[in-house]
Image (cartoon, rainbow, N blue to C red):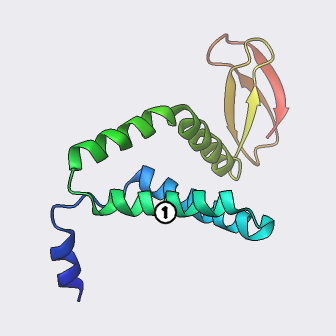
């Protein structure tokens, strides 16, 4: 069965970032439509899901990859912001992150060292904080 599916998908585009977004947006629109009984949202959700599957099974790989690249370019700032926030949240488990009072540079200090004197690498200002 898996082999048949692989043969069927050979030469087709498959799933990408835009396709995942379209499916998730369609499911969210469908859930909201279920709560609000909105025919417009039901139609929108089905249109998003059908378009996502059209993209998955499409044989026009160059056009689908151009659409995905357009989507990635438009969402670049949001994706990098969210990735930085996720990284900061992971670092907060083992480090404190302070801002220099002079130049506002973020400085990462390991937790559990007591009161320490921190020197800013940018402006060489020193300040005392608890780590």
In this view, the residue in front, 82 or 72, is: 72
On screen, residue 109 versus residue 45, left or right, reads right
The picture places residue 104, in percent across and down from the top left corner, at 74, 18
Identified at 37% across, 54% down, the residue is 16
Q: Quadrant of the N terminus?
A: bottom left
On screen, residue 8 versus residue 34, left or right, reads left
Q: Give the class, few, some or many, for how many residues have Cα within 10 Å of label 1's Cα (few <14, many ≥20).
A: many
In this view, the residue in front, 74 or 113, is: 74
Identified at 73% across, 70% down, the residue is 34
In the depicted structure, whether residue 121 falls above or below residue 89:
above
The picture places residue 112, in percent across and down from the top left corner, at 76, 49
- Give the quadrant of residue 71: top left
The picture places residue 81, in percent across and down from the top left corner, at 60, 36
Q: Quadrant of the C terminus?
A: top right
In this view, the residue in front, 87 or 101, is: 87
Q: Furthest-front residue in view?
A: 39
Identified at 65% across, 42% down, the residue is 85
Q: Furthest-bottom residue in view?
A: 1
Disc 1 on helix, strand or loop?
Answer: helix
The picture places residue 59, in percent across and down from the top left corner, at 20, 56
- Give the quadrant of residue 38: bottom right
In the depicted structure, whether residue 65 falls above or below residue 49:
above
Q: Which residue is mark 1?
A: 49
């Amino acid at each position: 069965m898996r082999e048949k599916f692989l043969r069927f998908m050979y030469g087709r585009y498959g799933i990408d970032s835009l396709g995942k977004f379209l499916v998730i947006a369609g499911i969210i629109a469908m859930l909201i439509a279920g709560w609000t009984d909105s025919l417009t949202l039901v139609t929108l959700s089905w249109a998003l899901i059908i378009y996502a599957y059209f993209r998955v099974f499409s044989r026009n790989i160059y056009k689908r990859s151009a659409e995905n690249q357009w989507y990635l370019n438009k969402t670049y700032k949001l994706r990098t912001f969210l990735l930085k926030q996720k990284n900061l949240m992971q670092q907060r488990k083992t480090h404190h992150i302070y801002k220099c009072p002079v130049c506002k540079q973020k400085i990462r200090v390991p937790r559990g060292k007591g009161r320490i004197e921190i020197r800013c690498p940018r402006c060489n200002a020193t300040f005392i904080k608890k780590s």
